Image: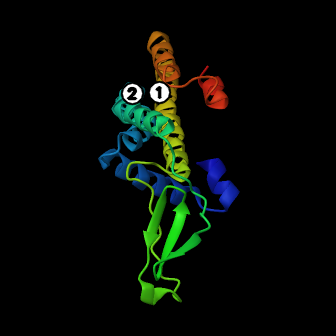
Amino acid sequence: MKEYATEHGLPEEEVSVKIAEIVKRYEQSNDLSKQCLAAIYRRNLKQAATLCEQNATSKVDLLKKKRQEVEALSKAPLKSDRTVEPSFAYGSGEIILVTDSSKGLRSDPEAQGSRDLLLAEAPPGKPTPAQLEAARRQLIKLTEEVMSEFKTAGDTYYANYQFDKALASYKEGLSYVEKKDLPTLWAGMQ
């Protein structure tokens, strides 16, 4: 606190009061991660490690579901994100908008001069590359959160001289990341 107060030109007492307010809010929060940080600040390492481990474990189910979602999206045929240049075919007084050799939509003959033609949509259930990429980003973020919680739990056990529990927490965290997928995250936990 002294270092922060000096660095930002604030009175140490003011910083201390603000931190106490934040810790109190974190202790009353429903967020286990915040409760863990508050317990660490209070130097209640046993409680902090337990809270961090509970938080990590609660996110594991979400992580597994997100992995399944990404895997399913990866296996599904993707619809194209690129804009398809329409081509037009004329026949029997109406315009047929062709966006794919197998599909065509008919427009109203009176709307021939209009650009308000209907475009064919990809079949439902086909994800776009953007959806797959968004799901992958969410998976990475969730993996980072789970790893961070297990690492914090391990660090807290370690600081409390519970080396066997620290090692178990680190190993548990490592089980949710592959070196080939997220090498930096894997190395940090390793």
Assess disc 1: are there few (<14), some (14-19) or many (≥20) residues with their C-alpha within 10 Å of its C-alpha: many
Which label is found at residue 150?
A: 1
Which label is found at residue 127?
A: none
Residue 61 position by quadrant: top left
Judged left or right of residue 82, residue 151 is left
Q: Which of the colour schemes (rainbow, by chain, secondary structure, one colour) is used?
A: rainbow
Looking at the image, is 28 positioned above or below residue 44? below
Q: Are marks 2 and 1 in contact (CB under 8 Å)?
A: yes
In the image, residue 28 lies at what x, y percent?
30, 48
- At a point 46% along the width and 79% down the height, the residue shown is 92
Looking at the image, is 132 positioned above or below residue 166? below
- At a point 49% along the width and 19% down the height, the residue shown is 175
Indicate which disc, 2 or 1, sits on the residue closer to the N terminus.
2
> Callout 2, which amino acid?
Glu
Identify which residue, 136 or 103, lies in the foreground.
103
> Callout 1, which amino acid?
Phe
Residue that mark 2 sits on: 53
In the image, residue 123 lies at what x, y percent?
41, 53
In the image, residue 47 lies at what x, y percent?
35, 29
In the image, residue 23 lies at what x, y percent?
41, 48
Identify which residue, 84 or 167, lies in the foreground.
84
Residue placed farthest to the front in the image? 92
